[in-house]
Amino acid sequence: MRVLENFINGAWVASAGTTLLDVKNPATGELLAKVPLSTSADVDAAVQAAKAAFPAWRAVPPVQRARYLFKLKNLFDQHREEIANICTSEHGKTFSESFNDFGRGIENVEHACGIPALLMGDHLENVATGIDTKVLRQPLGVFAAITPFNFPPMVPLWFLPYAIAAGNTFVLKPSEQVPLSQKRIFELIGQVGLPNGVVNLVNGGREVVEAICEHPDVKGVSFVGSSNVAKIVYRKCGETGKRVQALGGAKNFIVIMPDADMERAVQNAVESCYGCAGQRCLAGSVIVPVGDAYERVRDLFVEYTKKIVLGDGKNPGTTLGPVVSRAHKDKVLSYIEKGLQEGAKLVLDGRNATVDGLPDGNWIGPTIFEGVRPDMVIGREEIFGPVACFMRAKDLDEAIRLANASEYGNASSIYTTNGKAAREFGARVEAGMVGVNIGVAAPMAFFPFGGQKASLYGDTKAHGAAGVDFYTERKIVIERWF
Ligand code: NAD
């Protein structure tokens, strides 16, 4: 069985870690690889390589740094299907979901190819007589990213292209649950001729994260994962004086007004809740039909949900893959039990779902609860599985109050044909990303991505202009020539 290695200073090297975790195909249970839990010594080696590479890399003109990314974009396009297949085998999502997952990552490489324009600063002549002021955007040094299991190719690419295009050097710690997509992506990165040490990859878990947050030579950390860990990373990085953007968990509300285009709205909401088996930070989680829309929405929702086909994501007919691991399946099942104990009504029960010929898959069928209240655990906490919770609201005000009662604020959507209601919702709902007749409000690479409240610790979102801000120091030069 292959044991994964780390990519440090341009070479694949064995980890110093002796603990190995299994990487399994969540649909079949097949063992795909073993991933080491690397140590602080591995992190130090990666950071030292990145630190040593920084002075020469920052001196490379931005237009030349961008040329590496053009090469990378072409290589990624050529290998898009291959990496999508790897993603499906380690994560479980369907092939088309994996294809789009990587596609969204590639769009970030594309956007970062425009780094010469993105790095331009401001300049004002004559702020006072004979004095000019300009803003220089400069790289800072070594940045690290720590990423979650749910978008194996994409999330690291929210960060890596901007960090290095801006002239920094970079260390990635991918999720230990899904390390194979990034292994292949780093093999491709290794082919574009970047100087050694500019990008590095260290496999592992908590020890690697702690070593990154504590390392004195790491200037900043981009984190994506659950809110509990996001908060820890935010705090540790604050203590050690680093820049940090820590994106956390979510509980996304979908409000459906009585005037909505019902068929399209509900079909879209169903996809939002069950796409990627509900393991999206933008997944619809709580459905709030407003006023007399309730029964129509619920009945249509159940009807469409019953059309979902559970199975191995590599099969073309599958619309719902397994959840990522046995442990995660148990966690989602425990939420369903909790919902029952709290008195919510199970309208569709996915607990005993099976798939012919695949007894070892982590299957959970689509599940629907009615009668969920904001004070229930299933109404409050992130389930991160194929479970939709219905709440009632008598009007838009109440729907917004329900959504805003959540400690999270990642995304929220409204379905309506009424512009005033949409405008009101967009203005008042406490979410970083708002969908209007869109169930998964995912900003593209050239816009910033991120939530509010417990969904984002820090004030800088990922990618787009925010990404460039995070990875640069805006130095002000005020000059006078005698
Ligand atoms: P997770 O928090 O368990 O893990 C994220 C990363 O942190 C991994 O690399 C992991 O190795 C590391 N980690 C885990 N426990 C740690 C600990 N105790 N100390 C230090 N490091 C630790 O998250 P996950 O289960 O991999 O991913 C799912 C979560 O990510 C969900 O909450 C989801 O909403 C969130 N997410 C958020 C966004 C966003 O944009 N806000 C995007 C994707 C995923």
Image (spheres, rainbow, N blue to C red):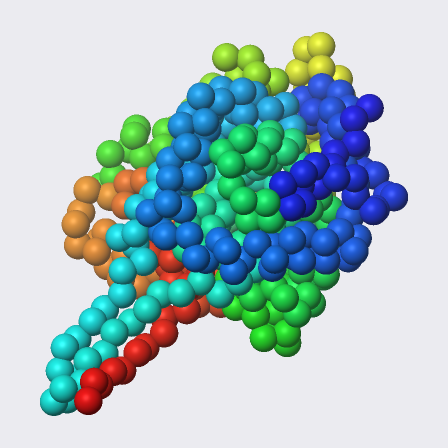
Q: Is residue 355 left or right of residue 374?
A: right
The front one of 393 and 180 is: 180
Q: Position of residue 401 (x, y in %)?
A: 39, 62
Identity of the residue drawn at 54% across and 20% down: 82
Spot the residue most to the right. 18
Q: Is residue 127 left or right of residue 283?
A: left
Q: Position of residue 376 (x, y in %)?
A: 59, 56
Spot the residue most to the top. 357
The front one of 61 and 248 is: 61
Q: Is residue 357 visible?
A: yes
Identity of the residue drawn at 24% across and 43% down: 416
Q: Quadrant of the N terminus?
A: top right
Q: Is residue 244 visible?
A: no
Q: Position of residue 297 (x, y in %)?
A: 37, 36
Q: Is residue 55 left or right of residue 435?
A: right
Q: Is residue 189 above or below residue 461?
A: above
